[in-house]
Amino acid sequence: MTREEGLALLRAHNRDESHMRHALAVEAAMRHMARAMGGDEEVWGLAGLLHDLDWEECPDRHGEACVKWLEEAGVDREIIRAVQAHAFELTGVEPVTPMEKVLYGVDELTGFVMAVALVRPSRSLADLEVKSLKKKWKDKAFARGVDRSVIERGAEMLEMPLERLMEEVVAALRPVESQLGLGGE
């Protein structure tokens, strides 16, 4: 599957612009981490792009409802498994490969990073530092929908300090911030 075909499949099942932006953010993080870890950037990017394919239509079966759609579209099995593993708590498919662990770790973190950027005067990632993320991290009322324990488990799975994972995600999102609705226009 090409990226364009992946985007078309994603758009066929997702209409909310915030979900599309989230998919693009996770795709960017996955591509960045693939480059850093020696993974296949195209495969990892598609896993990130398609990870929430069924979220709008089947939130009660998230990570499972989309399997049929992905198989019918000819998506590689390793991507399908990564999509299932990112929703480990719902699907029971445990992240075991580096790609699966990264997807599990960056999914919620991209949302947190974007939320922090949106409350900054610049609304940008260009001047966002990990210390700002850590400050907001401690404020449990901020971005309360972000499951911090999932992010922490993802960093543990990757054997990476949380601060480093945050740093990597910020670096990954900076080049695509305008596509994410961030930064000056």
Image (cartoon, grey):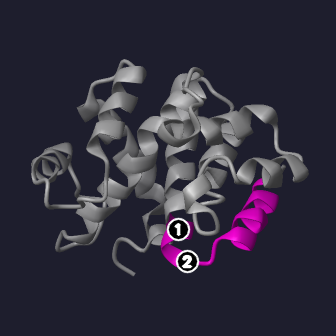
Residue at figure coordinates x 39%, y 31% from the top left: 154
Front one among 2 and 17:
17
- Asked if the magenta segment contains residue 15, the reply would be yes
Tell me the amino acid under the disc marked 2.
Answer: Asp
Residue at figure coordinates x 60%, y 23% from the top left: 38
Q: In the figure, is residue 64 to the left or right of 120?
A: right
Mark 2 burial class by Cα count in 10 Å: few <14, some 14-19, many 20+: few
Q: Quadrant of residue 122?
A: bottom left
Q: In which quarter of the image is the C terminus?
A: bottom left
Q: In the figure, is residue 54 to the left or right of 88?
A: right
Tell me the amino acid under the disc marked 1.
Answer: His
Residue 19: numbered disc: 1
Front one among 85 and 89:
89
Q: Where is residue 11 in the image (x, y as percent from the top left)?
A: 70, 71
Q: Position of residue 109 (x, y in %)?
A: 36, 47
CA–CA distance in space, label 1 to label 2: 5 Å
- Asked if the magenta segment contains residue 3, the reply would be yes
Residue at figure coordinates x 89%, y 52% from the top left: 72
C-beta proximity under 8 Å, tags 1 and 2:
yes
Tell me where the magenta segment starts and ends, as one range.
Answer: 2-21
Residue 16: numbered disc: 2
Which residue is the extreme one toward the front? 60
Residue at figure coordinates x 53%, y 77% from the top left: 17
SS for callout 1:
helix
Q: In the figure, is residue 96 to the left or right of 180?
A: right
Q: Quadrant of residue 146?
A: bottom left
Q: In this view, does 50 lie above or below 161?
A: below
